[in-house]
Amino acid sequence: MKLRLGRYVYGLGGIAFGVTTLVWRQIDSLGNISHPEILVYLTGIAELVAGLAMQWQRTMRFGALTLSAFFSIFALYWIPQIVKTPLVFGPWGNLGEQFSIVLGGVFVVASTLRSNPERSATITRAAYGSFGVCVVSYALYQLFYLAYTAELVPKWVPPGQMFWAIATTVAFALAAIAILSGRLALLASQLLTVMLVLFGLLVWLPPAFSEPQKMSNWTEFASTLGMAASSWIVVDFLSQPDADSRRWPFVHLRARQEESLPD
């Protein structure tokens, strides 16, 4: 699997996280947990170096492994919150967002396993299916917090905030169905990527510049960039000629069944 632009954007997401961590000297992804200053600096530097490493072929695997490891820690932070309040969807949604960023790095690592194509295929199938589940969580997150989602939509965008909150929730749901079923998966992933990029540019970047002192604006932008990068990597994956043989097992099984049907 040869990745195109997605892995560069993934690296930019790592750089954004690293810069944010170093500037505010806080690991926002770990909530209210107190962090020793040395841990903050190590995390920020590691994210920054790993993000830069993603920009070169020779160091891409190191960068992906490092970023996936750190993003996995951020994702695991939400597990205790889920155990504490299992009926509240907020922690579940945050876990889905963080884990989708982890999966971008997993795809990149799998793309470097050229000497072991079977292992690469196994990893990418698991990552592909998991990413589809994460997109389901995107839709549910917005559905359960629809009023909050509407407030995030810029007021100047016609026809209205609630319209776009509902429209994007439906779009997330349709993208998840397409990715998990394999029908129009490439188109759905492309549109999903465009939507996430627009979220970053229209929803989170303006407040980051209007209120640059607020760390949350920058971390939300970095998170959205990471989610968009993972989606972009999925687009790169689905654009490969042999992608059908390495996708979600259900998709591959359905494809083989369709091929066996008589004309």
Image (tube, grey):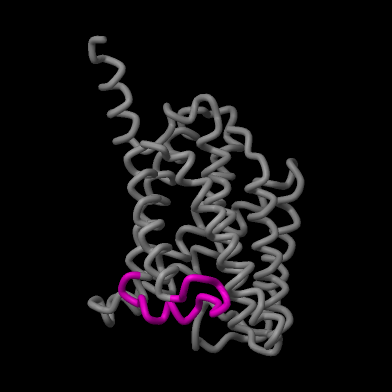
Q: Whole-percent x and y of residue 141?
A: 36, 70
Q: Residue at x 48, y 41 (%)?
A: 187
| Residue farthest toward the front in the current orientation of the protein | 159
| Direction from residue 186 to residue 83 in the image, left or right | left
Check the image and report above or below for 237 versus 204.
above
Residue 3 seen in the current view: yes
Q: Nearer the viewer, residue 221 or 80?
A: 221
The part of the chain drawn in magenta is 143-161
Q: Whole-percent x and y of residue 124?
A: 46, 40
Asked if the magenta segment contains residue 107, the reply would be no
Q: Residue at x 43, y 40 (%)?
A: 185
| Residue farthest toward the top in the current orientation of the protein | 263
- Which quadrant, please, contains the C terminus? top left
**How many labels were placed on the picture?**
0
Q: Whole-percent x and y of residue 86?
A: 25, 76
The quarter of the picture where residue 1 lies is: top right
Check the image and report above or below for 146 versus 245.
below
Q: Whole-percent x and y of residue 206?
A: 66, 78
Asked if the magenta segment contains residue 151, the reply would be yes
Residue 39 seen in the current view: no
The quarter of the picture where residue 68 lies is: bottom right
Q: Residue at x 34, y 44 (%)?
A: 180
| Direction from residue 154 to residue 4 in the image, left or right | right
Q: Residue at x 64, y 67 (%)?
A: 201
